[in-house]
Image: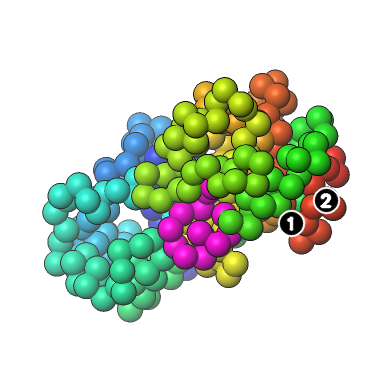
Amino acid sequence: MGRLGIVAGGGELPFIGLKEAIRMGEDPILLGLKESDFDPNVEPSRTIQVHLTKIGSILKLCRKENINRILLTGKVRKDLLFKGLKFDLKALSILAKTINRNDHPIFLAIAEEFEKHGIIFESQKKFLSPLLLKQGRYTKKKLSSIEIEDVVFGMDYAKKIADLDIGQSVVVLEKSVIAVEAVEGTDETILRAGQLTHKKGGSVVCKSSKSSQDERFDLPAVGVQTLEILKKAGCRTLAIREDETIVIRPKDTIEYAEKNKINLVCYGSQGKKAINQFQKL
């Protein structure tokens, strides 16, 4: 049996995935992306640093390390394509095959190339399922009827922009879309919305997967850092989608939300009926 390679961007998620993979009996290795904020000193004995833009070199490394499965984790800024980075021939050939430079076509083209070499991309849920939440409210204060309507409204629009492969997040207030995520990422989207709504307050951040999300790529992720941005922007509620959003350190995230009076809700198949149903981890 081959090894699991964890392509690791910035943040805690790669290390959470590493621990879970080891718990499941894997012998994983972190492929730390130099173009991200990945810290190679956290797990040095299990880390090899690689360039995101050097796909040919990554394939050679996978053969050398007997890697036959890949797990994608961590944060990489989407604007890297516009930073003048130098891509190797394999990366350039993959980019040439994509219908556009949005996330999903690029992920698909990379996965297809790796599959030609006997390497498959694993579902992120396989190793990160403990970080997925069921529908309901995870903070104590009940949402008002206006806030509930904003969650329903915002989650619908968030799914629509995700389906268009534009972004995963929208910020809404009183059934008006204040900001839409694109290449700048969720944090900057929230801060931009805060500039427009901070005095009034009460805006809702909605983050959603696609209608038919490919579980191998780019599941939405939130955590304490996300809530810190909400607090800074003066947003009152974070809404995510049931079983489709990775919550980094769920207990700490919920505690931070409670302490800072931020509503945390998980939107699911029951829609608005379940938004105010209190849930415990």
From the viewer's perspective, is residue 173 above or below residue 41?
Answer: below
2 and 1 marks in contact (CB < 8 Å): yes
Q: Residue at x 26, y 76 (%)?
A: 97
Residue 151: % across, % down? 69, 47
Q: Which residues are magenta?
A: 158-170
Q: Quadrant of the C terminus?
A: top right
Mark 1 lies on residue: 268
- Whole-angstrom CA distance, mark 2 to mark 1, is 8 Å
Describe the element under mark 1 as helix, strand or loop: loop
Tell me where residue 257 sits by quadrant.
Answer: top right
Could you tell whether 201 is left or right of 278 in the image?
left
The image shows a total of numbered marks equal to: 2
Could you tell whether 165 is left or right of 242 in the image?
left
Residue 107: % across, % down? 38, 65
Query: What amino acid type should be assigned to the residue bearing mark 1?
Result: Gly
Q: Assess whether residue 98 is covered by the magenta stretch.
A: no
User: Which dot marks residue 274?
Assistant: 2
From the viewer's perspective, is residue 23 above or below residue 122?
Answer: above
